[in-house]
Image (cartoon, grey):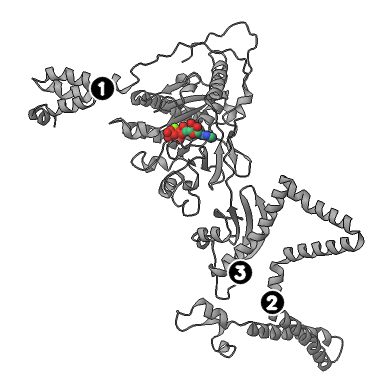
Amino acid sequence: MATATASPSSAGVPVGPGLSMFDPIFIGIDEFGQPVYITLAYRNLLAGGEPGGGKSGLLNCIAAHAALSVDSRLVLLDGKLVELGQWEDSADAFIGPDITAALDVLRRLQVVMNNRYAWLRAHNRRKVTALDGLSVITVLVDEIAFYSATVGSKQEEFVALLRDLVARGRAAGIPVVAATQRPSFDIIPTSLRDLFGYRAAFRCTTPNSSNIVLGHGWAEQGYSATDIAPTNQGAAYLIAEGGIPRRIKVAYLSDSQIAGIADYAAWIRRPGTITTPPSSPADWGMAA
Amino acid sequence: MSKSSPRRPFGGRSNGTVTVIEARVHRSSARNARLAFVMTAVIVGLLAAVVAASYMHPILALFVGIGVGVPLGGIVWVLVRIWPVIRLLWWWTPEIGLAGLLLVGWVQLASHTPTLVTLLVVALVVGVPAGVPVIRRQIMAWGWCLVVRHRLRVCFAQFIIANQSGSLPLILWATPTPVGERVWVYLRPGLSVKDLEGRLDKIAVTCHASTVLIERASDGNAAYVRFDIKRREVLTANVGSPLVDVIDPATPTVEQAPPVVPTALDLPDVQAPTITLPKQQGTSGSKPAKPAATAAANGSKPAAASSSVPDDDVSDWI
Ligand SMILES: Nc1ncnc2c1ncn2[C@@H]1O[C@H](COP(=O)(O)OP(=O)(O)OP(=O)(O)O)[C@@H](O)[C@H]1O
Ligand SMILES: [Mg+2]
């Protein structure tokens, strides 16, 4: 984590950009040239597609928004270490290819989730809203196959914990965004895959792979990610609010742009600037 | 043809193997026209007679009814008989209208202005849209909209046989989209979105397009669908993120500990752990373990070393 040396001389102290995780997140444009937004606060997103398709680009786009949002915390799990590595200073947890650490952070998230539901119950409410002042804890998992399939015996616990988060985290403000190349049943169980409401299919090599990402039957209806050109990285079919796949092009952030945003986010997030909301109870301070 | 049709009213067939074409032939236009004539004449005639009866003697009213009903029925009969022609005119209405406008414009221009001015105006009218890319593309897009409606009808007429009477879906308006066209269609009985989805590739070929997608255009009416015809890929340019503009580049950076840079970045730098594993188990294997590990860079030697390990080691391993 960043060791903040917040200079007391307040010359040029930036003002927070005022983004919120409850705001729609800009992720690109569609075929009509219209901007495409998704609201992630109550949704889970699964991205799939062949290597080099642009999945990590989408995750970075979401991470950038989350990092700049004042009411957001980031939990990053990245099997490749480099895809989300630049956000490490803005994130509350950054886990590389280390399943033990991943399990630890998922267990923490589970406790937070349970506490939040208890808190909601105590207030006779059913879901966290923007007015609660609770932070949205965005969980980004890149290369989910690394945690759920390629590492030995702990994978089952990982899958179980993640499934619980995906299933119950929604209303508690803990959205999960996961990316993997081909989320077939041997990589993540179908019971987990089908819980993701939003899907993004980058280029796939077979209609079957496309169906695995988008959901059964879409390829037969003409929505097959095989017709994306291999050179057109970042183009994808997205199932979001509309329920029908839309062809989109994901906004791309270059390494230096990410570095700029990450530095800025790390600065506005340095300890002492993010104000914990006054209404927030102390019992779930474990998340911090 | 018309002789056989009364014997099998409403297409009631004894065997289920009558093909659609045959049924369509049976329902000839002549029979339809006669039916329309009788229906119109009877209904209009009766209505006219009833109305007229309140003004005059019923028998006179009957004659009035016949006098009104029969001519009207005749008109309807003619309409039904020439219906194929009317339909054709209706399909080509935009083109006919455009051609008429152009013709009238040309004639008016030619007869009211000297030749030089006429040529100048024509050159302007043709040259400016052809020369300005934005206008040219817009006109091409609208032109494709006209073309694609005809192509879609060809699809429905040629290989998407909907029902026995061969009625074609109503092809409504079309608008250009950045990737191609979007056409709204009202399906007739006998077709569904599912039927059409099985033929997307053929429809794309017929429309000279790359892909075709079909969506329902209305939540409440399954007959109202939308064809998205795609003939070019537009999502090829890079898209920037507006978040880049949100940040302040003059922000001081948070100081952080310098990251640990790992070494051993090439294959020879990393020793294979599997080679040392059997050596630890084997009682006499401690000696050859070292050369095997250090020689890993050369590639051929470790294989020889591992193959030289005695058999008992392998059985231990298993
Ligand atoms: N939205 C985009 N616009 C333009 N280029 C892109 C976009 N997204 C990705 N690319 C290009 O594609 C390359 C690979 O993208 P990315 O790393 O996101 O792929 P990936 O799907 O995560 O691959 P992997 O499965 O190997 O992790 C990037 O380095 C970039 O050059
Ligand atoms: Mg990636």
In three-dimensional space, the C-alpha distance between marks 3 and 2, rounded to whole angstroms, equals: 14 Å
Question: Quadrant of residue A130 in the image?
Answer: top right
> Is the residue A97 above or below the residue B18 in the image?
above
Whether residue B272 is visible to the viewer of this picture, yes or no, is no
Query: Is residue B100 found left or right of A56 in the rendered image?
Result: right
Q: Amino acid at mark 3?
A: Leu
The disc numbered 2 marks a residue on which chain? B
The mark found on residue B297 in the picture is: 1
Pair 1/2: label in front: 1
Q: Quadrant of residue B81?
A: bottom right
Asked whether the residues under marks 3 and 2 belong to the same chain, the reply is yes
Q: Position of residue A287 (x, y in %)?
A: 46, 21
Examine the rendered structure and indicate whether residue A270 appears above or below residue A222: above
- Say which residue label 2 marks: B83
Q: Nearer the viewer, mark 1 or mark 3?
A: 1
Which chain is mark 3 on? B
Q: Is mark 2 within 8 Å of ligand 1?
A: no
Location of residue A142 in the rendering, given as x and y in whole percent from the top left corner = 43, 31
Q: Position of residue A10 (x, y in %)?
A: 63, 8
Give residue B168's mark: 3
Would residue A187 be found to the left or right of residue B241 on screen?
left
Tag 1's secondary structure? helix
Q: How far is the residue under mark 1 from the one under mark 2? A: 86 Å
Q: Which residue corresponds to the image point at 71% horizontal and 83% vertical from the top-left?
A: B77
Q: Nearer the viewer, residue B96 or A109?
A: B96
Disc 2 secondary structure class: helix
Precedes in sequence: disc 1 or disc 2: 2
CA distance separating discs 1 and 3: 74 Å
Q: Amino acid at mark 1?
A: Ala
Q: Are marks 3 and 2 in contact (CB under 8 Å)?
A: no
